[in-house]
Each structure stands twice: as structure tokens, then as C-alpha cells.
């Protein structure tokens, strides 16, 4: 980023509460979720609901509501916290205005929650680097979302957002998440901390659009450290999982130590015990696949999980709880995902298992008869 002055943005707030922005945010927030009661209730009188939100934003009386939290267990156990639907509309409205400010500052090889990126492009990039380099250092941030520090998060955003009203809205959303992930966070003390460090506000609720975006902003600091300071030419990050490639294990060991030190300044840790350089020829477990220089395999755990899910879908169909279209959609989605690996035999097995059920038309419906 050099020594050039940082451009900051003012007068953003009217863009956030403009009717056009709120209406677009509402339509984005409801996409794929119109079957849920909370969304249907909002949609029944959506214009008056948006007018209420707009008025609250204009007079700054808007306050986020309580989260509804629940656990999911795939791919791992995580606490998901869903904000009320009106708050999700506000999250979309905010991100539509401030996201472009940061998007141009993200590195090319950051792949999560960005237009034109995603898991499959991250896998392709991983394959490219695995073919070019001999060794890989794979790291993941320990208790990432629960550990994100609100003061550092706010400073990161305020560096570019010079609009007090917009920052006040950001503060309200940040504050609404305090304590939501408290039980998921194991306290860590960093150099210079005293006992009051335990009181520092932290945590971004998993499930908020703002959390996904702000996570990228937070770890963008790490991205630029790795690219600019360590001068790593082959680096990929997807949320809190990241890979560094090199021809020399010694360099990766040195980078590992530097990353641990840098992340300490962000009040984050990696799982250091498993972050060790290894040959790419051993395979790189990444985003549900194991990536080799010349092929990819689906992680066995993912296959087991999907077979478990397929069994539940099959049972629901047999009991008349779902239509065949739901079965087809489940299988088609899974096949589309695993098609990014060398999985023809696995696809045939899944179709075969589906064919054991009364819905014999499934193979034809998914185009694999």
C-alpha cells in the first residue's frame, strides 16, 4: 500500500437508506428463502416494512433484533446465528454500498464470498500451484469468527469509511453480535495483555452477510502481509483456510513463524500443530477435496456425510414427505460439486444407490442413465 495517502469515503449513509438500495437489498435477502415464515411475513407488507426500516435508518433509531441460534454439523459443528429478516435487509443494504470500497483492495487469490470467485476457482488455483511448486504450507485460523476483535475490525473499516453515520450503523451491527459466540471462544491472552483483555468485545455471528464480508476485510491484512512482506508468489485463501507454496521447505518454515507473529497482532492464532510444510505429492486437503498435482479426490468424510443425507432424502420420499424433484435436486447438486474432482466412479455409485429406491427415474432426471 506504500506511503501514498489512503482514500476514505464520505457521505455514504444516504446511499444506504435510499429506497432503491433498500428495495434491492430486500430482494437479495429474500432470494431462495421465501418459503420461511419470517420472510413471508415481511413480504406480505414489504413496502410498509421497508418504509419503517428507512425511517429508522434516517432518524438513526434503528436497532438490530435478537439472533436465533442453532448448530449445524456439516462440514463441522458450528453455531449459526440468524438475524431477524429486517436486519438481514439492512445488512445487504450496507454491504451493497461499502463492499465496492474494499473489493478493489482484496488480493486476487482471496476466493470466499466474492463475485467471480468461489470454491471451484480456488480448487483450480490450488491445482495450478501444486503443479508448479514442490511444497505447501497449509494453515487455518483457530476459532476464527468467535475470535475476531471488534476494535481491530472497526479500525480496519474506519480506515476507508469516513462517514460517521455509516460507522455508527456498523457499530450497532458489531455490538449486536457481542456474546453470541461467547461459548464458542476459548480465551487467549496475547503479549502485553492484562486480565481486562477478557472483556474485549469479539466475535462475528456466523450467518450474517456482514460477518462474511468483514471476515474478508479482517484477513485482508494477513493477505497483504503474505504477498507484500513475505513476498509469497503462490498463496490462496478461502475464509480462514490458506495455503502457501514454495520450492523450499526452509522458506515455508520461516514464513510460518512470521505468520504466527503477524496474526498475534490481529489477536488470532493458527492451529500450529498441524501447520507444517509437506510435499504437494502427498495431497492437499482443501475445500472438501484432496488436491494432487495431477488429480483430485473427494474427501472420504464428505462422501460419508452425503450418503447419510441421501438416506434421509430417500426415506422422506418413500414416506411421501417430499417430491421427486427434491430428490433430483439433491443428487444433481452433489454430482455438480464432485464433478470438480476425478469422481466418475463415485458418481456412478451414488446414482446406483439412488436407483435402489422407488424413484427409478432419478438417473434419467440427473442426466446419468
Image (tube, helix red, strand yellow):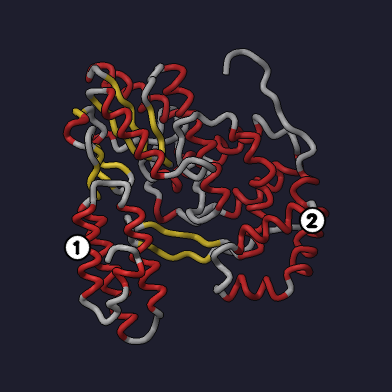
Measuring 42% from the left and 59% from the top, which residue is drawn there?
79
- Quarter of the image holding residue 234? top left
Q: Is residue 75 above or below residue 123?
A: below
Q: Is residue 281 left or right of residue 51?
A: left
Measuring 27% from the left and 29% from the top, which residue is drawn there?
130
Quote the CA–CA distance across marks 2 and 1: 51 Å
**Mark 2 falls on what kind of element?**
helix
Crowdedness near tag 1: few (<14), some (14–19) or many (≥20) residues, C-alpha within 10 Å: few
Q: Position of residue 295 (x, y in %)?
A: 23, 39
Between marks 2 and 1 in the image, the one whose residue lies nearer the viewer = 1
Choose the circle earlier in sequence order: 2 or 1. 2
Q: Position of residue 278 (x, y in %)?
A: 20, 29
Q: Position of residue 187 (x, y in %)?
A: 39, 44
**Mark 1 falls on what kind of element?**
helix
Q: Is residue 31 left or right of residue 330?
A: right
- Quarter of the image holding residue 120? top left
Crowdedness near tag 2: few (<14), some (14–19) or many (≥20) residues, C-alpha within 10 Å: some
Check if mark 2's residue and mark 1's residue have beta carbons within 8 Å: no
Which residue corresponds to mark 1? 349
**How many labels, in total?**
2
Q: Is residue 277 above or below residue 144?
A: above
Which label number is shown at residue 19?
A: 2
Q: Position of residue 28 (x, y in %)?
A: 62, 57
- Quarter of the image holding residue 369? bottom left
Measuring 36% from the left and 21% from the top, which residue is drawn there?
258
Amino acid at each position: 500500500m506504500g506511503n501514498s495517502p489512503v482514500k476514505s469515503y464520505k457521505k455514504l449513509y444516504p446511499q444506504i437508506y435510499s429506497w432503491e438500495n433498500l428495495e434491492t437489498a430486500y430482494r437479495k435477502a429474500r432470494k431462495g428463502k421465501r418459503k420461511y415464515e419470517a420472510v413471508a411475513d415481511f413480504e406480505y407488507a414489504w413496502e410498509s416494512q421497508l418504509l419503517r426500516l428507512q425511517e429508522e435508518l434516517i432518524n438513526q433509531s434503528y436497532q438490530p433484533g435478537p439472533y436465533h441460534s442453532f448448530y449445524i454439523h456439516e462440514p463441522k459443528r458450528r453455531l449459526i446465528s440468524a438475524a431477524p429478516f429486517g436486519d438481514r435487509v439492512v445488512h445487504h443494504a450496507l454491504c451493497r454500498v461499502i463492499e465496492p470500497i474494499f473489493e478493489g483492495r482484496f488480493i486476487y487469490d482471496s476466493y470466499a464470498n466474492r463475485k467471480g470467485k468461489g470454491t471451484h476457482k480456488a480448487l483450480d488455483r490450488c491445482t495450478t500451484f501444486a503443479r508448479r511448486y514442490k511444497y505447501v504450507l497449509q494453515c487455518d485460523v483457530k476459532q476464527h469468527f468467535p475470535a475476531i476483535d471488534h476494535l481491530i475490525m472497526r479500525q480496519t473499516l474506519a480506515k476507508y469509511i469516513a462517514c460517521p453515520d455509516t460507522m455508527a450503523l456498523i457499530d450497532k451491527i458489531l455490538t449486536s453480535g457481542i456474546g453470541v459466540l461467547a461459548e464458542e471462544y476459548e480465551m487467549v491472552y496475547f503479549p502485553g495483555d492484562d486480565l481486562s483483555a477478557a472483556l474485549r468485545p469479539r466475535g462475528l455471528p456466523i450467518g450474517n452477510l456482514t460477518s462474511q464480508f468483514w471476515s474478508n476485510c479482517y484477513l485482508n491484512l494477513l493477505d497483504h502481509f503474505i504477498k507484500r512482506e513475505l513476498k509469497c508468489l503462490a498463496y490462496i485463501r478461502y475464509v480462514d483456510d490458506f495455503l502457501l507454496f514454495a520450492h523450499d521447505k526452509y522458506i515455508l518454515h520461516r514464513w510460518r513463524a512470521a505468520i504466527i507473529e503477524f496474526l498475534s497482532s490481529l489477536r488470532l492464532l493458527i492451529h500450529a500443530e498441524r501447520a507444517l510444510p509437506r510435499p504437494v505429492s502427498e495431497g492437499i486437503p482443501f475445500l472438501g477435496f484432496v488436491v494432487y498435482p495431477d488429480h483430485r479426490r473427494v474427501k472420504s468424510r464428505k462422501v460419508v456425510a452425503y450418503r447419510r443425507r441421501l438416506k434421509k432424502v430417500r426415506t422422506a420420499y418413500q414416506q411421501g414427505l417430499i417430491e421427486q424433484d427434491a430428490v433430483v435436486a439433491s443428487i444433481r447438486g452433489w454430482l455438480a460439486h464432485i464433478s470438480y474432482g476425478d469422481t466418475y466412479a463415485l458418481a456412478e455409485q451414488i446414482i446406483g444407490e439412488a436407483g435402489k429406491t422407488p424413484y427409478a427415474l432419478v438417473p434419467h432426471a440427473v442426466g446419468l442413465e
